[in-house]
Image (spheres, rainbow, N blue to C red):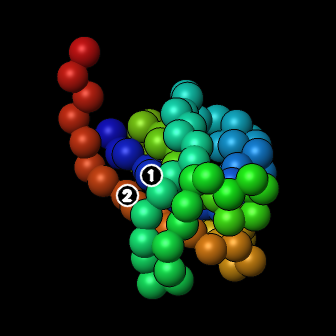
Amino acid sequence: MKKLEIIIEAIERRRVCKILDEVGVSGYTVIDDLQGRGKSGSKNASDPSNILKSSMIIVVDEESVINSAIDKLKEVFKFYSGKMFLSDIQVID
C-alpha cells in the first residue's frame, strides 16, 4: 500500500479531489486551513480568502491507483504551488 500526501493551495482542492475520484481512489481525507512555513514563506490559516490558504489531502490505496493519481496531479502542480509526498505504508486494521 502507498500513502500520498498532497499539500495544495485551497483554491485548487476541488480540482484535486475530482482527479482523485476520476482515477478511482478508494477514499481520501481532507485537512483544511494548514499553517506552516516553506521556501515560499509562511502560510496563515486565518486568511479570510482561500487565496493564501492551503489544504492537505491524504490518500491510501494500491500503488497502481496512486501512480495514476500522481500522473494526473502533476498537471495541477505546473500552475499552483504545493507538494506531494509518497510513502510505503502498512495498514493496521
Disc 2 marks which residue? Answer: 86
Residue 43 in which image quadrant: bottom right
* Residue at (35% x, 45% y) in the render: 2
Question: Which numbered disc, 1 or 2, marks the residue closer to the eye?
Answer: 1
- Tag count: 2
| Residue 69 visible in rendering | no
The image shows residue 2, relative to residue 27, as above or below, that is below
- The first of marks 1 and 2 along the sequence is 1
The image shows residue 35, relative to residue 78, as above or below, that is above
Cβ–Cβ under 8 Å for marks 1 and 2: yes
Identify which amino acid the numbered label 2 is placed on: Leu
Disc 1 marks which residue? Answer: 5
Q: Position of residue 52 (x, y in %)?
A: 68, 65
* Residue at (26% x, 49% y) in the render: 88
* Residue at (76% x, 45% y) in the render: 14
Report, in whole angstroms, how far the alpha carbon at label 1 lies from the one at label 2: 7 Å
